[in-house]
């Protein structure tokens, strides 16, 4: 008999159809060895827009798990300088959020053409 501990709903496995299910820590770790975790990854001018599957629930309260994240990094300043961060529950929300982040970067470029 398998015993599920309190961490069970902290870790999630991403299925091939982009749905997910709760899993144990070992299953969670193994998925990162074999699978591409990027929903999207784009470079626009000096910015990197990266949307990834986190697989750990970042919703630290009740409600739907937050399992995807989009971040924008200004690579001119520092490749780890985050300028923007949004999180999502589903793959589709993450895809949409990735496109919004790309637009955000493009809008920054229009507003700040003289500084970049």
Image (cartoon, helix red, strand yellow):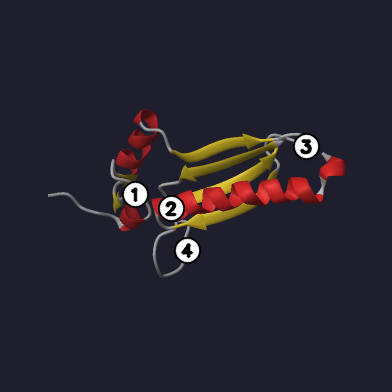
* Extreme residue in the top direction: 34
Q: Nearer the viewer, mark 3 or mark 1?
A: 3
- Pointer 2: what residue? 67
- Residue 60 numbered tag: 4
First-in-chain label (4 vs 3): 4
Residue 83 visible in rendering: no
Mark 4 neighbour density, 10 Å: few (under 14) some (14–19) many (20 or more): few
Q: Is residue 61 above or below residue 97?
A: below
Percent position (x, y) of residue 84? 65, 51
Please tell me whether mark 4 sits on a helix, a strand or a loop.
Answer: loop
The residue sitting at 33% across, 57% down in the picture is 9
First-in-chain label (2 vs 4): 4
Residue 3 visible in rendering: yes
- Pointer 3: what residue? 77
Percent position (x, y) of residue 99? 54, 49
- Residue 12 numbered tag: 1
Percent position (x, y) of residue 91? 40, 50
Q: Nearer the viewer, residue 77 or 59?
A: 77
């Amino acid at each position: 008999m398998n015993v599920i501990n309190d961490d069970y709903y902290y870790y999630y496995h991403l299925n091939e159809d982009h749905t997910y299910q709760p899993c144990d820590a070992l299953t969670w770790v193994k998925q990162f060895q074999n699978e591409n975790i990027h929903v999207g990854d784009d470079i626009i001018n000096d910015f990197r827009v990266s949307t990834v599957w986190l697989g750990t629930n970042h919703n630290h309260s009740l409600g739907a798990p937050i399992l995807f994240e989009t971040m924008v990094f200004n690579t001119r300043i520092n490749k780890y300088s985050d300028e923007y961060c949004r999180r999502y529950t589903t793959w589709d929300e993450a895809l949409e959020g990735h496109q919004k982040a790309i637009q955000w970067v493009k809008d920054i470029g229009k507003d700040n053409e003289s500084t970049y």
